[in-house]
């Protein structure tokens, strides 16, 4: 559980002061990722990223393991959309440099390197990577579908994530990080 201040009507955050609310009446609530998801459904994408930037949302090892299980779906998107080729040809962002140095094999996405990177990647870089995928119109549900895995193909400790995808509780990579 984490703590977060919300105003009674609408959360307002000072961009210069991080997570301090500027409103007069605020409510302190305890939340889990499930509860907070229902609270923030109508907020802007900037506000959502801003809220989670200042909360302690660690990425659990199961999420890293799950990404390794569905890596075939990531490979399909990276190679079929030529995103791997574009990153290999030139890197405009730090995360693209990370992808080229740690995930690509030449101009092709490498499943083995991706899974190896999941072992050592820090939480911030993992978030940046998943947000990068999301910004390139890749979604968690599409990656799962392209991986062609069924619930029986996954270890038992990872089936709850797959069930959440199948139930549409997880659609985007942001949903995946918040789950």
Image (cartoon, grey):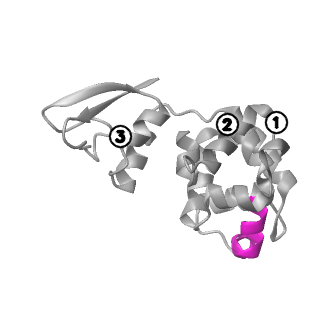
Residue 168 versus residue 175: which sits nearer the camera? Answer: 168
Measured from the top left, where is residue 122 in percent x and y? Answer: 65, 39
Which of the two discs, 2 and 1, labels the residue nearer the N terminus? Answer: 1
| In front: label 2 or label 3 | 2
How would you rate the neighbour count of disc 3 (Cα within 10 Å): few for under 14, some for 14-19, many for 20 or more?
A: few
User: Element type at marker 3?
Assistant: helix
Q: Residues within 10 Å of mark 1 (few under 14, many from 20)?
A: few
Q: Do the numbered discs 2 and 3 sit on residues whose CB atoms are within 8 Å? A: no
Q: Give the percent coordinates (x, y) of residue 101.
A: 76, 58
The residue lying at 43 percent from left, 48 percent from top is: 49
Residue 179, magenta (yes or no): no
**Main SS category, magenta section:** helix
| Mark closest to the chain's N terminus, 2 or 3 | 3
Which quadrant does the C terminus fall into?
top right
Q: Provide residue 13's location: percent of width, then percent of height.
A: 26, 43
Measured Cα–Cα span from mark 2 to mark 1:
10 Å
Residue name at image x 37 percent, y 49 percent: 41
Q: Residues within 10 Å of mark 2 (few under 14, many from 20)?
A: few
With respect to residue 106, does 14 lie above or below? above
Q: Quadrant of residue 58?
A: top right
Q: Is residue 144 left or right of residue 6?
A: right
Which residue matches tag 3? Answer: 39
Task: Return the residue nearer the eye: 86 or 66.
Answer: 66
- For residue 155, the mark is 1
Q: Residue beneath label 2, please?
A: 160
Q: Which residues are magenta?
A: 73-88
Asked if residue 35 lies left or right of residue 73, the reply is left
Task: Identify whether 28 is placed above or below 15.
Answer: above
């Amino acid at each position: 559980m984490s703590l977060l201040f919300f105003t009674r009507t609408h959360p307002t955050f000072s961009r210069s002061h991080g997570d301090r609310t500027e409103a007069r009446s605020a409510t302190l609530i305890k939340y889990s990722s499930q509860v907070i998801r229902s609270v923030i459904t109508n907020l802007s994408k900037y506000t959502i990223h801003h809220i989670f930037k200042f909360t302690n949302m660690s990425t659990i090892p199961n999420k890293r393991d799950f990404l390794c299980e569905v890596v075939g779906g990531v490979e399909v998107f990276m190679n079929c959309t030529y995103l791997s080729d574009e990153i290999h040809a030139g890197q405009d962002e730090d995360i693209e440099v990370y992808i080229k140095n740690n995930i690509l094999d030449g101009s092709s996405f490498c499943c083995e390197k991706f899974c190896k990177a999941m072992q050592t990647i820090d939480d911030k870089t993992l978030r940046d990577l998943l947000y990068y995928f999301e910004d390139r119109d890749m979604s968690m549900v599409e990656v799962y579908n392209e991986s062609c895995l069924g619930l029986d193909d996954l270890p038992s400790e990872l089936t709850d994530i797959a069930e959440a995808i199948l139930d549409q509780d997880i659609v985007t990579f942001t949903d995946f990080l918040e789950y």
